[in-house]
Image (cartoon, rainbow, N blue to C red):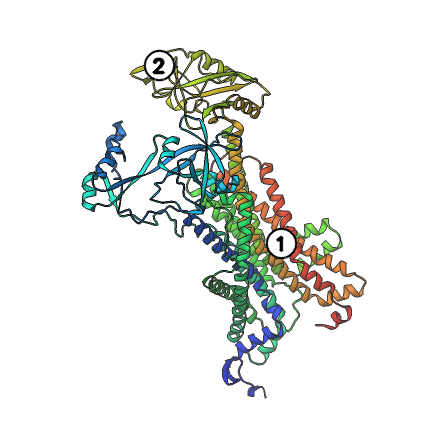
Amino acid sequence: MITSLPTFGTVRRHRGGFVSTSLRLGVAEFRARPGRALLPGVALVVGVACLLAALVLSDALTRSVDEGAPVTPSSVGHVVEVKPQPYDPSESSGAQRTTVKLDDALLAKLSAVGRAVPVQVAEADLLDANGRAGQHRAEVHVQQPDLVRWPLAEGRQPAADNEVAVDKITAYERGLRPGDGVSLAAADGKPFSVTVSGVLKKGGIDSRPVLVAGPDLARKLDPQPLTKQVWVIGGARDAVKTAAGASYVVWDPEPDADKIGNDLTFILLPFSVLALATAVFVAAATFRAVYAQRQRQTALLRCIGAQRGPLVRRSLFEALLTGVVAGVGGALLGGPMAWILARTFDVTGISVLFGAVELSPELLPSLGYVVLGVVVAAVLSVVAAVRPAVNAARVSPLAALREADNEVPTRSVRRLRLVFGLLFIGGAAVLALGAVAAKGTAAAPLAVTFSAIAAVTGLFWILGPVTVPFIARLFGKIGGTHWKLAGAEVRRMPQRSASVALPLLLASSMVTFFLVLLGTAQEMTHSFANEERPDATVVDAGERPLPAIPAQDGVAASVALHRAENGAGADPEEFKAWLKAQNVPGAERFTSGTAIVPPHWEDRPFVEVGGKRYDVVGTVPGTLTGYTPIIGGLTSGPTEKVLVALQPGTDPAKFRAGLQAALPDHPTVVVQTDADERAEADRYMHLGTVLMMVLLGLSVAVAVTGIGTALTISVQERRKELALRRALGVTRGGLQGGVIAEAVMLALVGVIGGGVLGFGYAVIAILSLGIPLVLPAASVVFPLVIGAVAVVVLAVVAAFGPSRGASRIRPAAGLASG
């Protein structure tokens, strides 16, 4: 009798213990079909690998930076600094504040108490292989031989006056090793050679050189270094405070004061969290499909008295086991993925921005990270399975006994879905219009954000079973038989297809959104660079007086600017001739005894220099003169800058090479051109684009795994259909092509749908910020096309396993299955 059967979910004795029936069935499902049970965990494996890769790589970056941080020697007893000064309202009325410095007078007072050692930083010009100075000067840290402050990666500390230690980025980029020679420019600009005694563990941020040298060499490079602190060795605290005076503060030395701790740990974390969120979406869709495949089993259990609670617990227990296995797999992949990211950052130059290079993350994460990965994967797996498990348990026994050949909701569900979808889309449109109307305000970005969320929710979540098949139908019309069959499969399971496409669509939309914004910022930078500027500017890298500049071919006009108290002096006729060659008006009345000012000074009637007033007679763009007043006839000071207008067709690079070749004894004379600023801006934009593509690419990789799992389930469900195709003469290659076409179609739906959505909201964001709208340049379109192609290639790779499985189905065995 049925009444004699035990109630499903009761506790029964099993192998000497009490085991819940729901848990036993969950374990049985794993033992019977481990592949299907673990299928939802594939995305979680990649998501957890992204999380641990971010943590491991951040640890390696933090360790690399912290290892190079300066340390305070243990013999230092006191640190003296300038006391922070409170705000003085009288400064706003033009009163000058008395500047307190760490000067020789203070050192003399402190030396009466103990040994006073200034902690100083100088500047110098590190010459390249051609013997010329670069645009960025080197930072030279002065180190006493007996007070070692900077740790070395290799070699020894500089001991002699002709030795320096270089940072690891400079050593990496120039191929320097201990014992090699480099050239520096002395304070007077004359070049001389020094020996590299060691390589620092510290790396220069953004390739800006960092050197460590002894006091004598530092004075040769920079006679007036900046004193940041004064160390006092010996003496009592009260005596040091008394000697320093009230304008200074005395601290206890902090050996690790310059270490950054965990500040860099969370640089990559937001992107890995985004990848995990994508993994949850994919896992939830896969759980839903897996539970739909078990409708017959669910129906049988419901017929014999199974309650919904134990069924849900069974599914959640399976999800827990899936998460644990996925966590272990993700932990094993986290180290290699971190290594790949580190090499990618090295190749693209991103590592240099952080002052690190050749990072070596651990290939095997620590036990703590493994436990973290397992816990995160288990929790997220259960979270992803809750709604599919509850929905699966709600299926009535008779309804569940039917085959799940398609997903056709009831008319009331479709009507409700349409109403809610239109409401969200309407709300998104209202918010977008409000963002544009409120441009320039703090509310505009918020309106854009919530509008985008509402649009995605309405179009691709609520109405996803309608929108995704519609887009797939468009692709089916332009393709052959494989594309039409792939489109039919998307329409057969619209909810599953929408769930698979949604994560990829979100990732694609974010990539497009940020790249379009970066491209707009780059165009704005180019617009700024296209403002009136000198064709070429000749300066000394260390702000030394310029020598006489020899005449060069291709020069239309030039003017020398001489150092002055509150501006720069120039010969009026030379200045006007140069402005004329630059096609810039504004100095027609400029003569000796007058001044030309940038626009932000135009309300001033005169400029005072050395007690003499010079009447303002015109304005010129500040980008031409360096935003400084130009004083007519004041040419007695040293030459600090030469502004050059080139003849049409003259190559600025050729002009630079010719001028520097004519000044072999002045290696610190550099030529700055418009192209230099544009190239610098393009470099930063390129690095930002690469960084965004790589980090958001983690989410794309997770989303693509959803295509593979969906196709695996689709092949399992369509064994009879695929066997029938084989019986009708379709080749194995034909079956493989059909499955691959379905993968490509889902990838294109996500990429193109997300690209259109991301571009649209990038335009809305630009308009809401009040920025002029420009069409995306090739620098934006090309990475997007490359990314789209990469996604399609990944989708094909993800479809390889399912397509191979489909091609191996034998007609007789497939038709007999079911």
The kind of residue tagged 2 is Asp
Count of numbered labels shown in the rendering: 2
Occupied quadrant, residue 78: top left
Q: Quadrant of the N terminus?
A: bottom right
Q: Residues within 10 Å of mark 1 (few under 14, many from 20)?
A: many
- Which residue is identified by label 2? 615
- Residue furthest right in the image: 729
- In this picture, is 167 found above or below 623? below
Q: In which quarter of the image is the C terminus?
A: bottom right
Residue at the spot 35% in from the left edge and 33% down from the top edge: 225
Query: Which residue is label 1 attached to?
Result: 468
Q: Where is residue 514 in the image (x, y as percent from the top left)?
A: 52, 44
Q: In this view, does 579 lie to the left or right of 245?
A: right
Looking at this rendering, what residue extends furthest in the front direction? 160
User: Marks 2 and 1, how far apart in space?
Assistant: 70 Å
**Res 777 quadrant in image:** top right
Pick the residue in front: 416 or 695.
Answer: 695
Observer able to see residue 558: yes
Residue drawn 73% across and 56% down? 737
